Image: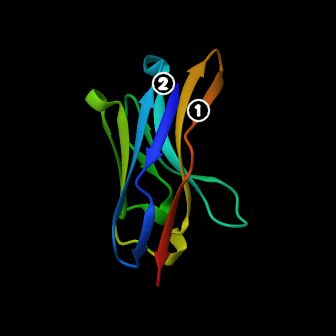
Amino acid sequence: VQLQASGGGLVQAGGSLRLSCAASGRISVINGMGWYRQAPGKQRDLIAYLPRAGTPNYTESVKGRFTISGDNAKNTVYLQMNSLKPEDTAVYYCYAARFIYGKVDEYWGQGTQVTVSS
């Protein structure tokens, strides 16, 4: 599975961005996709996750502002980010998971920088 992320950039506080993550390869094995982010000096945290069958879930800090969605025809997952805050500044990573035999295979896209100016 290969993941290609795009859509980062520089935006003012209160603005919006949409990230995209296109998956290719053995897509059928994927059980879910999501987005992590990593701010400078901090750990990489999961912020949104979309199961193949199920409802999306979000970390508390982005609930009500970010929306994760998928387009099966395009094998793409999106992260719509609204009401952006300076604390959302981070490198955002696309992620896919495959659950098999009690373990998780993880797949990562390259990071895309999101910078929110105050």
Q: Residue at the location (50% across, 56% down)?
A: 59
Q: Residue at the location (37% across, 28% down)?
A: 53
Within 10 Å of disc 1 (Cα), the crowding (few <14, some 14-19, many 20+) is: some
What's the mark number on residue 107? Answer: 1
Q: Is residue 94 visible?
A: yes
Q: Are marks 1 and 2 in contact (CB under 8 Å)?
A: yes
Q: Position of residue 42 (x, y in %)?
A: 70, 63
Q: Position of residue 113 (x, y in %)?
A: 53, 60
Above-or-below relation of 66 to 107: below
Within 10 Å of disc 2 (Cα), the crowding (few <14, some 14-19, many 20+) is: some
Q: Three-letter amino acid code at disc 2?
A: Ile
Quadrant of residue 108 within the rendered picture: top right
Q: Which residue is mark 2?
A: 30
Which residue ends up furthest to the bottom in the rendered image?
118
Q: Residue at the location (57% across, 23% down)?
A: 99
Q: Three-letter amino acid code at disc 1?
A: Tyr
Above-or-below relation of 49 to 13: above
**Front one among 112 and 78:** 112
Above-or-below relation of 45 to 82: above
What's the mark number on residue 96? Answer: none
User: How far is disc 1 from disc 2 in space, using C-alphas?
Assistant: 9 Å
In the displayed structure image, the side of residue 116 where residue 70 appears, left or right: left
**Dot placed on the residue nearer the N-terminal end, 1 or 2:** 2
For marks 1 and 2, give the one nearer the viewer: 1
